[in-house]
Image (spheres, rainbow, N blue to C red):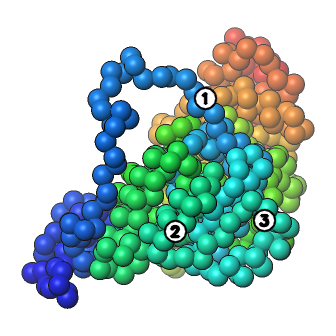
Amino acid sequence: MSRGRGKGRTIWVCQQCGFESPGYYGRCPSCDSWGSLVETAAPGRASSTPRPASGAATRPRLLAEVSSAAESRHQVSIGELNRVLGGGLVPGSLVLLGGDPGIGKSTLLLQAADALTTSAGSVLYVAAEESAEQVKLRADRLGIAGRGLYILPETCLDEALEAAEQVRPAVLVVDSIQTVYVEALESSPGSVSQVRECTSRLMQYAKRARVPVFIVGHVTKEGIIAGPRVVEHMVDAVLYLEGERFQQYRILRAVKNRFGSTDEVGVFEMVEAGMREILNPSEAFLGERAQNTPGSAVVVTLEGTRPILIEVQALTSPAGFSMPRRTVTGFDVNRLQMLLAVLAKRAGVRLGDHDVFVNITGGLRIAEPAVDLGVAVAIASSAREVPVDPQTVLIGEVGLSGELRSVSGLERRLQEAARLGFRRAVVPQRRVNGLSAQPQMELVWARTIAEAIEQSLSGQASTPGPGGGPARG
């Protein structure tokens, strides 16, 4: 099944998982994806990654002999990027930054490179997609002087690594991994074998020279890094820059980080002068919230150690003679289907003949179940045309029997809501007893989704708490 191409031979490689086969499969035997196998040149012996030189560093060592001293990190003056990286850039680490085209990856890395010239030293920026003049135009727009920042417009990775050996930068940036190539391979840049080989050589350079390396990766229409998923396994950290191109907010999220937590997020705003940090995301996301509007509710999500207040918008409309639609933005559509079934079965809110639209404002994508209560109440508010109390936040997970389940970090969520001026919170009842300190706000305890809807839409806070006491903090 394989065909010769020049002096080499070709193999079929899955773009999703990196599975290799001498023949073509319509469906990948490894990851079951259809039409993902692409014909590419098989690497020869000359294209294999060079082995590191033997020495004391490569001999087997007892774990007890290995030093456990924490290595100093390069601090980036961009606090939101520092947060996502886990407190700074680790020497010798390989960081992959992915995102949709035009989302701001090159802008963020150019700003980070300029900031690192102050804290770490010189930075080599390999511009494989742009000329030096184009990078200079962007730098002028961002107000970057470029002292200590070297620009190399080069697509050959061998030439780029040779230049890095000469310059000896403190940080290396490659933009992007899909446009650089290794001469030893016959395949074109961006192919599976080229992307994997280039990433492997950059990893070898980063570990040997103890230089942090940033690489940019394009995202496919399915929302994954272009190329085999094995590239994500080779790097130390995978960061995604999310957001809509026509919205000003950008979310930086870590989906893999060997040197820190994957729960932290960084929030930026795209302005004329580049990516600007949002130090208080809650105020930014709630700045345009309309008051006393049916279908609007405020939830408190916990991203890592940071509580963020987000507005959830819901709209219900009769479907007429068409099939009812379920459209979501920033929320799981399967989770929405479950909440609609619970609302119909346990709370009497039946929307089988209605279109339902749910939107998480600000471009943030929320996956944690603590926002279930806010989404369900927003849907009920739109269906009944009754607004939610604008001074109320909703926190809780909804179970299949309609009960409200406790969530983690409730105390931090309540403190953040109280700091922003909210006076009332609807929370699961059994969790409130564990609070070490009552926040300066009124607490409404609810056992079921039906109770929470009535308390949220009525605006009354006189429901009895555990033991018959008032539900007040």
Indicate the quadrant where residue 199 lies.
bottom left
Question: Label 1: few (<14), some or many (≥20) within 10 Å?
Answer: few
The location of residue 295, given as percent across then percent down, is 73, 57
Residue 315 shows in the view: no
Badge 2 element: helix
Q: CA distance from mark 1 to mark 2?
A: 47 Å
Residue closest to the eye, 417 or 37: 37
User: Residue at position x 74%, y 59% from top?
Assistant: 148
Badge 1 element: loop
Q: Which mark is residue 408?
A: 1
**Mark 3 belongs to which amino acid?**
Gly
User: Residue at position x 31%, y 70% from top?
Assistant: 193
- Mark found first going from the N terminus, 1 or 2: 2
- Mark found first going from the N terminus, 2 or 3: 3
Indicate the quadrant where residue 137 lies.
bottom right
Badge 3 element: loop
**Mark 2 belongs to which amino acid?**
Ala
Residue on which disc 2 sits: 160
Left or right? Give the position of 103 relative to 67.
right
Residue closest to the eye, 398 or 330: 330
User: Residue at position x 78%, y 22% from top?
Assistant: 471
**Mark 1 belongs to which amino acid?**
Ser
The location of residue 133, given as percent across then percent down, is 72, 82
Left or right? Give the position of 269 relative to 265.
right
Residue on which disc 3 sits: 146
Q: CA distance from mark 3 to mark 1?
A: 45 Å
The residue at the far right in this view is 421
The N terminus lies in quadrant: bottom left
Q: Which mark is residue 178?
A: none
